Amino acid sequence: MRSLITKTNPKSPISEQYRTIRTNIQFSVVDRPLRSIMVTSSAPAEGKSTTVANLAVVFAQQGKKVLLIDADLRKPTVHYTFRKDNHVGLTNVLTKQAALHIAVKETEVENLFVLTSGPIPPNPAELLGSAAMEELLAEAYDQFDVVLFDTPPVLAVTDAQILANQCDGTILVVQSGKTEIEAAQKAKELLLAAKGKLLGVVLNQKKQKESSYYYYYGNK
């Protein structure tokens, strides 16, 4: 499996960071559990797909039954990460060509299931904003404890904004040394304007000194 350090090396400092993010997410809302979380970025290639896949793994490792949905219907990657075929997926469910329980696929990680994108449609935004999407989410809540969405970058297309107000929370991934401050701020504004609940920001690819306290603590 590609980029799944939480699966291949669960004791690494990076995996511990993903577990810290999981804990912070769970503590961010006290009145009720977060059932659906969307992960996005301001621009492409900032690490959102890697982040959401590893978060899905650490939630599953906690014993939660997790569904990771590839809602990036323009450049899907979940099927590559988990080495699944992508003949049937989200777009098939939304267009009533397949039932959710048929389209969902098991993974090598216990408790973790994925719904790949399915065939790339000509109208991703319309599909994601459809009543069928609300029905899918309701059905997913009946079958899974946590539903995670991988979505396109916020500034590229409107898809992430459409999903933001359907999910309980949104996480924005920024890449150290790459993401422009103005781009991150604009992405935040768009998500909030869409009535999305921004839980926080994940800083990706930040170089860490090997002599840092955390590294020392985790390896001695």
Image (spheres, helix red, strand yellow):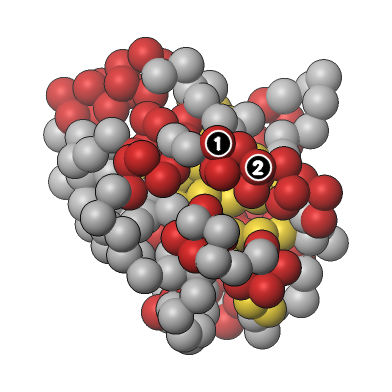
Q: Position of residue 15 (x, y in %)?
A: 58, 63
Would you say residue 73 is visible in this rendering? Answer: yes
Relative to 50, residue 173 above or below? above
| Picture coordinates of residue 195, whole percent (x, y) | 47, 16
Going by the numbered disc 1, the residue's amino acid type is Ala
Q: Which residue is mark 2?
A: 135
Rendering coords of residue 65 (x, y %): 79, 60
3 up-or-down from 132: above or below: below
Label 1: how many Cα within 10 Å (few below 14, some 14–19, many 20+): few
Local SS, label 2: helix
Q: Secondary structure at mark 1?
A: helix
Tag 2 near tag 1, CB within 8 Å: yes
Q: Which mark is residue 89?
A: none
Q: Amino acid at mark 2?
A: Glu
Q: Identify the image quadrant of the C terminus.
A: bottom right
Distance, label 2 to label 1, CA atoms, is: 6 Å
Of residue 130 and residue 38, the one placed in the foreground of this image is 130
Q: Nearer the viewer, residue 170 or 84?
A: 84
What residue sits right under mark 1 in the picture?
A: 131
Tally of marks: 2
